[in-house]
Amino acid sequence: MNRTLVNQCNHKVGSKILLFGWINTIRDHGKVIFLDLKDFTGIIQTVFKDKSAVSEGDVVKVEGLVKKRPQNMINLDLATGQIEVEIEKLVIIAKSKTPPFPIDSEGQDIEEALRLKYRYLDLRRERLQKNLKLRFAMIAYMRKFLTEKGFIEIETPILTKATPEGARDFLIASRLQPGKFYALPQSPQQYKQLLMVAGFERYFQIARCFRDEDPRSDRAYGEFSQLDIEMSFVTQEEILCLTEELFAELCEKVFKKKVFKYPFPRITHDEAIKKYGSDKFDLRSKKDEGVLAFAFVVNFPLFEKTKDAPIAPSHHPFTAPKEEDLNLLEKNPMKVRSYQHDLVCNGLEVGGGSIRITDVEIQKKIFKILGYKDKEIEEKFGHLLESFTYGVPPHGGIAPGIERLLMAATGEKNTREVMAFPMTASGQTSVMDAPSEVEADTLKELKIKTG
């Protein structure tokens, strides 16, 4: 007998089937025991007579007959709620200890540190399985959409060079070159620009990004994913139109939600601040259920003042200034506007991008305004500037955040609820005890001293 998946059982009434899965819950009704069996595709009620044989969490093999439930036992909230399986044979494949918390609930009232310690159990709950399945469906649709638009997916390196992009880098010691370090990429920013120089006019990847910055509800500590898109010979408006077409289709075909306004409104940064007091606003007058309200914010200032610097990039140092403001670069740089564009949705920034600088002299001028000396510019960015001397096309792009977009689509309160194995707010990995100490011999080989 071949295995039947739970989501296939509705079509098997009157048939004997073979199921594999976990015992999700047990309900003792005296003469009969109801066992909810769960596999990757769903949950189904089974009827059994031997309570002592099984406990919650056990992995089982079940043979039985699919029957219609009595009318008063139908559960319309369950996909298989009109049927049940009368068990004829049950084999316990693996026993389970009592889980440290219930997994048949939403789980949001359970201490997060405990949930992440036992994340492999936490992920069994229906809410998180739905979130990760939606994540998969979203990424699969993104790949299909962009491939049909003539884009190709190219992976860029994870071991790279430390360059300033707005956050602290994670560093990795080199064994072959003692005293030197790789950095994990904060984004593939320079690599995707180099791909434009290389002639790959339409690039994308689902990029893993690493930033050592304080955690926020809309960004988990350590790492996150983004859809990285870059195009040559493109205008800002063309980037926005491609993005809104993709996101409108995602809403309709993947998220099954309505778009508040289409085309997405274009709102200048000044207008956003004056009207909403923020460049991450919610267009909805009330928190409408099942509606995603997208808007683009444009005409950002090129520079901003931060707590750490009197002048810093509003986006990143590769963002192109508006041509009509180039004369302000030296005399009044804080007044210069840029070709940055952000995508907001329901009060979250879910993506950002820009048209890039391709003029070597303008790029050097930006670096100097930001305080870099000639030697630093050559050391940190010389490879990029050198590439621009071999014929660089005009180019730009956008990078929607995978987790933030899913936060908006699912209504979750933080990005950890749409990731498989997120870090805690203190930087501890799920399940694994990391970061951790390493053996003295390993540190010696890497020429690293601690303490």
Image (cartoon, grey):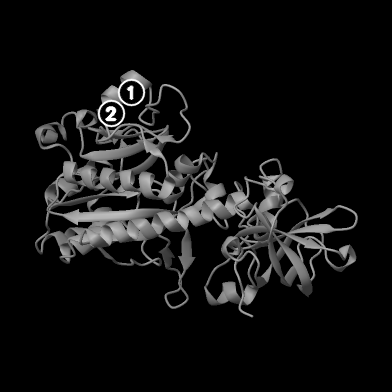
List x then y, in percent, for residue 310.
34, 33
Disc 2 marks a residue whose amino acid type is His
Residue that label 2 marks: 269
Q: Quadrant of residue 296?
A: top left
Q: Quadrant of residue 265?
A: top left
Q: Which mark is residue 364?
A: none
| Above-or-below relation of 371 to 444 | above
Q: Nearer the viewer, residue 390 or 98?
A: 98
| Above-or-below relation of 220 to 198 | above
List x then y, in percent, for residue 271.
27, 23
Quarter of the N terminus within the rendering: bottom right
Quarter of the C terminus within the rendering: bottom right
Does residue 223 appear anywhere in the picture?
no
Q: In the displayed orientation, state which residue is furthest to the bottom.
A: 1
Image point (49%, 51%), residue name: 212
Q: Is disc 2 placed on a helix, strand or loop?
A: helix
- Tag 2 and tag 1, C-beta contact below 8 Å: yes
Q: Nearer the viewer, residue 256 or 280?
A: 256
Q: CA distance from mark 2 to mark 1?
A: 6 Å
Residue that label 1 marks: 273
